[in-house]
Amino acid sequence: MRSIWNGNISFGLVSIPIKIYPATEDHSISFRQIHTRDSGRIRYRKVCELEDKPVESSEIGRAYEDADGALVPITEEDLAALPLPTTHTLEIEAFISASEIDPLQMGDAYYLGTSGAAGAKPYTLLREALKRSEKVAIAKYAHRGRERLGMLRVVGDTIALHRLLWPDEVREPAGVAPKEKVTVKPAELDLADTLMETLGEVDLNDLRDEYHEALEELVAAKMSGATPTAEPGERPAGAQVVDLMAALKESVRSAKEARGEGAGGEGAGGEGAGEGEAEAEEGEEEAEATVHELRGRKKAPAKKAASAKKAPAAEKKTAAKRGGTKTARAAKAAEGAPAGKAAGKATGKKETGTKKAAAKKTAAKKTTAKKQAGKRGTRTAS
């Protein structure tokens, strides 16, 4: 491994000769620009605009361009005169907890190795002191013409250096977060927790750069003259306005299927709990939000509401039938009573009329008999 910086760690009065090595590497494949017509290389040449001809690297210097476009030359002598005490020294300033460092400040990583046998003892001393204190060291150093900030921490048996951005180099996230007022319900958070638990944890060593692997296969096939067999990957779907609860439930289901789990289990219980809370909150007023109320979670309450409505309806129907039967009977009884009385009265009147008619008939017969007897008496006298 080739070192990129030589110097010393200044640990108080202790000086540790070191070399800096890159701790990371980019595994991406580099491409060259070519002329598509004849595959000729396309190269960039450094050309002086005034002379319109290429110049050598030894003839190239630095200049600062102001707001008006004017160039102010800055020579190597000007830069050498600047106070830069950390030119060849990595000077430790303090020791702090790693949690005090904002991850946004983290930059490139390097390994620090010793330069010669004399640095082994002080190097080991600093490493063990960092281990026992469970802290990291904050240091200043110069690299590529400017002073930088760094963090020293222990990685295995090696001291690693992480380049840190200066605090004023980290931008504030003003205006980045959504400005819309959104209300996230507990049921939605429960489903999000269920999804997180279902996805679980992962060993970062198991993750692979699938695009890079496919690209390597493509290059190898081209070099061997074979026809590439790689199939185009699926394009990610664009952003859609979805039912958030339904999307969470579907995500949990898909995650379980990917892990070979069934629909039941703890995840299902969590989902059921989310649905229960969602049902309890249906009666609440909706706040202004971009999250739409889920149709999926209304199905269960709808069934419950339907069954709840059916029971009172059935009871009302039965009560109505019973009431109707009683009413009919009462009406019949009410109709029967007057009808009976009327029939009785009619019968009484009929009987009274018959008796009167019989009496009149009897009286008429008696009158006729008297008349006949009178006529007979008259005839005898004569």
Image: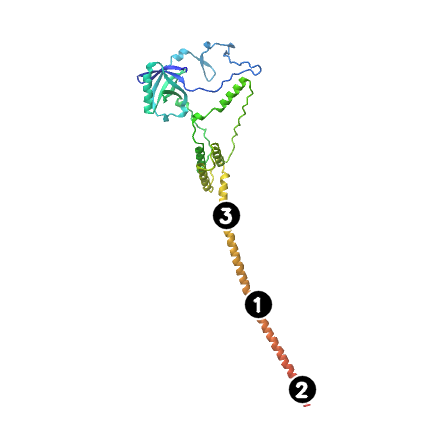
Q: Say which label, 3 or 1, has the lower sequence index.
A: 3
Say which of marks 3 and 2 sits in front.
3
Circle 1: element type:
helix
* Residue 376 marker: 2
On the image, the x and y values in percent for residue 342 come to: 56, 67
Q: Mark 1 points at which residue?
A: 343
C-alpha gap between disc 3 and disc 1: 49 Å
Query: Tags 1 and 2 in contact by the CB under 8 Å rule?
Result: no
Residue located at (56% from left, 65% from top): 339
Which corner quadrant of the image does residue 107 belong to? Answer: top left
Of the pair 138 and 156, the residue shown nearer to us = 156
Residue type at mark 1: give it: Ala
* Residue 305 marker: none
Query: Tags 3 and 2 in contact by the CB under 8 Å rule?
Result: no
Q: Mark 3 points at which residue?
A: 309
Residue type at mark 3: give it: Lys
Residue located at (65% from left, 83% from top): 371
